[in-house]
Amino acid sequence: MSFQGFDPAVVDFMWGIRFNNSREWFEPRKEEYKAVFEAPMKELCRELYAAFSARHKDLTLTSRVSRIYRDARRLFGRGPYKDHLWLTVSAPAERWACQPTFWFELTPEGYSYGLGYWMAQAVTMAKLRARMDRDPKPMEKLVRQMEKQDIFHLEGEEFKRLRPAPSRLLEPWYNKKGGFSLSCEREHDELLWSPELAGHILSGWESLVPLYRYLSTLDGDPDPRET
């Protein structure tokens, strides 16, 4: 079955979880969850992965959809269910959040998609800065491309004391502390209820592929901390 868009009822369902996060509330509504939330998210993921991986056959990619159930070991006083779901397409990895990852997320407030490098290890960020120091031009070219569009915005924690970058253009990227993301955030709108959502996400992801390719090779660089 192809993706037909989300049902607007999913918004009320997510808010329902937000304010009634308990087994007693969720269990009688489990079939509704599967129909309006889980099934369309999985259909969207299958469609995005099939189209994206077909366009980039040289990339080794895998896809996943988050579970509604929180890890029981990490509840920290929260309810047992998530009030949001996401899907990802990335290289296979034990810790996918440590890899550059294409994503889509649906929350009670809205939805977002883009390219995330949320939990890049310290050595990876050091390699990124060292690569920009050695040859800033490739990254500057990518940043200029990013500055020509207004869909995705750079996010991520910066060092409290900024480090001198090879150029002013690279400063926001050079000073990201533990990862970053290129994110497009939208309120719930007509596109979300439409099959056209998949093509819209794919088009956005496609514009981020050059940056993905640049980032995905960082692990092969030497550790600059050992020189």
Image (spheres, grey):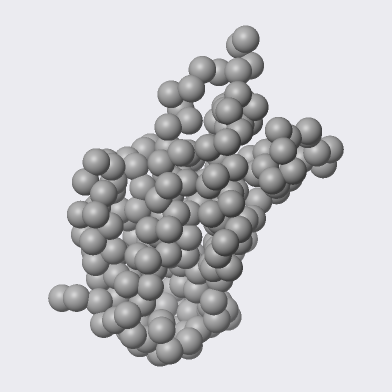
Closer-to-camera residue (5/148): 148
Q: How many marks?
A: 0
Residue 62, x across and y down, in percent: 28, 48
Q: Which residue sits furthest top?
A: 227
Q: Would you identify the image quadrant in which residue 184 lies?
A: bottom right
Furthest residue to the left? 1
Q: Is residue 107 above or below residue 11?
A: above
Relative to 212, is 118 on the left or the right? Answer: right
Name the quadrant containing residue 136: top right
Instruction: Look at the image and tell me in which quarter the N terminus lies.
Output: bottom left
Q: Nearer the viewer, residue 70 or 37?
A: 37
Quarter of the figure with the C terminus: top right
Name the spot of residue 16 as percent of width and height, x first. 50, 83
13 and 47: which one is in front? Answer: 47
Residue 80 shows in the view: yes
At horizontal 50% and vertical 69% (from top left) the residue drawn is 112
Residue sticking out furthest to the right: 161
User: Is residue 69 visible to us here?
Assistant: no
Q: Position of residue 181 (x, y in %)?
A: 56, 53
Q: Residue at x 55, y 18 (%)?
A: 223
Residue 122 x %, y %: 61, 30
Question: Who's the residue at 43% across and 58% down the image?
Answer: 207
Residue drawn at the location 35% of the way across and 53% of the way down:
89
